[in-house]
Amino acid sequence: MTTAAKQPLKSKLCSVLSREYGEDPGGSAPSWDRCLIVEVAKPWKFEVAESSHFPAGVSEALDRAEKAGKPARLQCVSPDPEYSQEGQTRVMLFSRPSGPLMTYSKVDYLVPSDQVGRLAHALLVDSDAVDEFAQHRQQSDGVREILVCTQGTRDVCCASFGFPVYNALRNQYAPALNGGLRVWRVSHLGGHRLAPNLVDMPEARNWVRLGTEHLDALVYRDRPVSEMRPFYRGWIGLRTPHEQMAEREVFMAEGWDWTSRRVTTSLVEPANGSGRATVRLDFEDQNGGSSGSYVAVVEAAAVVPTMHCMADEKPGEAEQYSVSRLEKTA
């Protein structure tokens, strides 16, 4: 592994510095099996769960789920005049399927605000109690949810670069799709140096560094996906950087049709400390039609320096990966 040539770190935004060092975001997406989305009124603290409006009981439900071996990621969204209701709180849970991956499943609720903690416990820990909330279930299975990080209390880049993208998506694209798209201001997604940072659910694809000029391609998919390579961080349903990098390479080769396929990945040869891994991707059309496989060799190629905008911390490093071989085997 080589180290990118280092220049003196300047006092500038971490996202700007990341671009200057040529950091490739590929393979750095977080990995979630479950993600709990909770509406929380602002202001937000650095840790949103410590904010004054954070619902009672949610942290305890997350802790119990963690101890039970069923952890869930927490993301908070800001109430929206169109999506939200006075005295009600929206709670969504996205869950990764146990088999091949195409999209996450979603359940969506609007509950009285004093019941949020109980609902979180039912969704995360005690599934037998979910029926109690059936009357609050919302029918939004066909709605695309784009979560854009704008949490300036976590890092200034999220607000500076995230808000213009959120604003365009929310006020131009969402209305044009007549209820088929909701756009949310979301809490810290991780990787603020890659801002603007968004997750497109229920596909669970993580896109970064997008400008407003790229949003037609993101929303309408009217341009080759290969043009979006620099902005694709990875698929959140995949657990390792090597799998995420291999999937990105196949996605770029197959085009947007790739998003309608059910995919299973496996590490044929794990990295085991070497930085090099062989990944197999098996896919089939969602209706059980054509199928095939790819094999990719992914290697750790370099590291680049990183920094934080709002924390007095030593500079860090981010690993960089490359796909040295990709072969369609069937």
Image (tube, rainbow, N blue to C red):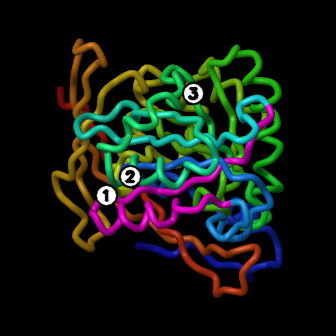
Say if mark 1 contacts mark 2, CB within 8 Å.
yes
Location of residue 309 in the rendering, given as x and y in whole percent from the top left corner: 75, 73
137 or 299: nearer the eye?
A: 137
Q: Quadrant of the C terminus?
A: top left
Residue denoted by label 3: 144
Q: What residue lies at 56% left-to-right and 56% top-to-bottom?
A: 24
Helix, strand or loop for disc 3: strand
The relative height of residue 168 versus residue 142 in the rendered view (above or below) is below
Residue 60 seen in the current view: yes
Helix, strand or loop for disc 1: loop
Residue denoted by label 2: 124
How dense is the environment of label 1, judged by Cα within 10 Å: few (below 14), some, or many (20 and up)? some
Q: What residue lies at 22% left-to-right and 70% top-to-bottom?
A: 272
Q: What residue lies at 24% left-to-right and 37% top-to-bottom?
A: 264
Q: Choose the circle earlier in sequence order: 1 or 3.
A: 1
Span colored in magenta? 54-81
Question: Residue 175's image quarter?
Answer: top right
Residue denoted by label 1: 70
Location of residue 130 in the rendering, given as x and y in whole percent from the top left corner: 38, 40
> The residue under label 1 is which amino acid type?
Lys
